[in-house]
Amino acid sequence: MIKRICVALLGIVAAFSAPIVVTVTPTLGPSSTSSANFDAWAVNVINGLQNTSSVGSGVTAYTPTASGAVLSGSDFIETSSVGIRSWRGIADPAAPFDLEFGTALYFSVTILSSAGATIRLADLNVTETYLGTSFGSSAIGGTYRSTLLGIDGSGNVLNNGQDPNTLVAQLYYVGVGFEYPALAGSGTNQEIIDQNAAAIRNQSDRTTQVCYDLGGADSSCAQILVEGAGEVPEPSSVVLVGMMSFFWVLRHWSRR
């Protein structure tokens, strides 16, 4: 009898202590403010998160980036503000990137519960540091949607306005996104992008980090670094360096 009770208690403890695994994955993709391809890209992100693999090609490709990776200063510049077509720092790119206005940096998250439906979107928080500036912690908010998908214990997909208190066993989120809106410069289109990239590289702290947690527990973080000013050749004319009152922008693209 005692042995049976012990086994039963162990089963109860295991059920309550079953792990929730949170995985944060950085990735680069089209800006939701200037790209007609954002929605198609987001579909590939959700599929890629579910299958832990790259999905698609061209502008809509989902390609995971390792936490701690080093990007160039031009990798998340958005150029619609200066009217320059670009992709990952390349001005006037060839097809299929020729209609894009730059790139954004996203931090996607996958949350899995081995105990079944024990995760609530309402509990999900994000803590952000963008190029060394902390934006603190905030709730993700909203409901289940195309960029924030849940799968309940019966395998039903939640992605169309379901209540955030609905319990799910799996959660996939395209993630918060960051981009630097380019400022006007001088010279060719490529030189203007290079000037903006140089400004980013001259930041004193070039770390961008995102952490997700479920009410203070079951948390995970990922970060991206930007190469420093001394690590790459500088453009010949840098009109933006020193103007550190740039309009650094933090945008939560997938809360749309």
Image (tube, rainbow, N blue to C red):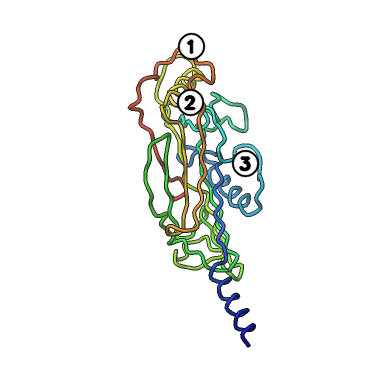
Q: Amino acid at mark 3?
A: Thr
SS category of the residue bearing label 1 = loop
Does the residue at mark 2 contact the one at mark 1 (Cβ under 8 Å)? no
Whether residue 87 appears in this view of the structure is: no
Label drawn at residue 84: 2
Of the two numbered discs 3 and 2 on the same chain, state the one appearing first in sequence: 3
Label 1 Cα crowd, 10 Å radius (few <14 / some 14-19 / many 20+): few
Residue situated in front as seen by the camera: 184 or 6: 6
Does the residue at mark 3 contact the one at mark 2 (Cβ under 8 Å)? no
Image coordinates of residue 155 in percent, x first then y, are: 61, 67
Residue situated in front as seen by the camera: 21 or 39: 21
Q: Which residue is mark 1?
A: 236
Of the two numbered discs 1 and 3 on the same chain, state the one appearing first in sequence: 3
Image coordinates of residue 248 in percent, x first then y, are: 38, 33
**Who's the residue at 42% across and 40% down the image?**
129
Task: Answer with left or right where residue 87 lies relative to residue 248.
Answer: right
